[in-house]
Image (cartoon, coloured by chain):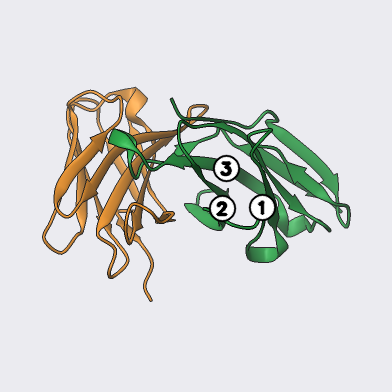
Chain colours: A orange, B green
Amino acid sequence: EAGVTQSPTHLIKTRGQQATLRCSPISGHTSVYWYQQALGLGLQFLLWYDEGEERNRGNFPPRFSGRQFPNYSSELNVNALELEDSALYLCASSRTPNYGYTFGSGTRLTVV
Amino acid sequence: AQSVAQPEDQVNVAEGNPLTVKCTYSVSGNPYLFWYVQYPNRGLQFLLKYITGDNLVKGSYGFEAEFNKSQTSFHLKKPSALVSDSALYFCAVRDGRGSTLGRLYFGRGTQLTVWP
């Protein structure tokens, strides 16, 4: 089966712009999670979507937002980009919240 | 509150020697515990999990982990390390209750280096 796919692989944006990151979960997985992995900060939880609804949100400002589509794919939007938003953004999916995650390879966002 | 501690930022071991990567956790309810591995510029790969049952869990690539409830630990082990095991290892915990349902809490990671 195909794994979790994320696009684009790399993204370079200018400070103040908006970035859109996309994630397709494994077929049959209804939960999608987003994490930020910034240098020296470990994995920071961003958002959890399940069955099209936002179920939980990490400690990030409102300019980080997203949605889940009827086919369970998901989009992460980051508005008003700041230099500190430069990081690897990881998407993961699971069949139900009781299972562990399967991660995608990530989108490397660089803000200049 | 849920949290994970990986007390060692780095672990160095010679090829062929046993390795241990340490993890301790804090969770309100019954812990669901996971180990992931990350190679450079890649996402995280699942190694193994403990949900319930036998305290010794066997996973991918010859890794295993031992759940110790009294010590709230879930150390990752391998009897004989390979150079190709060199990577960043993350321990994670989940509590199935309340508003954090589904969310995994990760440790800061341990960089494992296996030298020939």
Q: Amino acid at mark 2?
A: Tyr
Left/right of residue A93 with respect to residue B112 in the rendered view: left
Are both tags, 1 and 2, on one chain? yes
Give the distance between the C-alpha atoms of the residues marked 3 and 2, in whole angstroms.
14 Å
What residue is shown at x 68% (from left), y 28% (from top)? Answer: B7
Nearer to us in this view, A47 or A64: A47
Q: Which residue is mark 1?
A: B55
Q: Which residue is mark 2?
A: B50
Q: Is residue A111 visible?
A: yes
Q: Amino acid at mark 3?
A: Phe
**Percent coordinates x, y for residue B77 in the rendering:** 74, 51
Labels 3 and 1: the sequence-earlier one: 1
Mark 3 and mark 2 in contact? Answer it, CB < 8 Å.
Answer: no
Mark 1 and mark 2 in contact? Answer it, CB < 8 Å.
Answer: yes
What residue is shown at x 29% (from left), y 61% (from top)? Answer: A25
Q: Amino acid at mark 1?
A: Asn
Q: Element under label 1?
A: loop
Give the distance between the C-alpha atoms of the residues marked 3 and 1, in whole angstroms.
19 Å
**Percent coordinates x, y for residue A80 in the rendering:** 18, 26
Nearer to us in this view, A93 or A66: A93
Disc 2 packing (10 Å; few <14; some 14–19; many ≥20):
many
Q: Which residue is mark 3?
A: B90
Disc 1 packing (10 Å; few <14; some 14–19; many ≥20):
some
Left/right of residue A40 with respect to residue A13 in the rendered view: right
Quadrant where the image shows the N terminus of chain B: top left
Left/right of residue A78 with respect to residue B104 in the rendered view: left
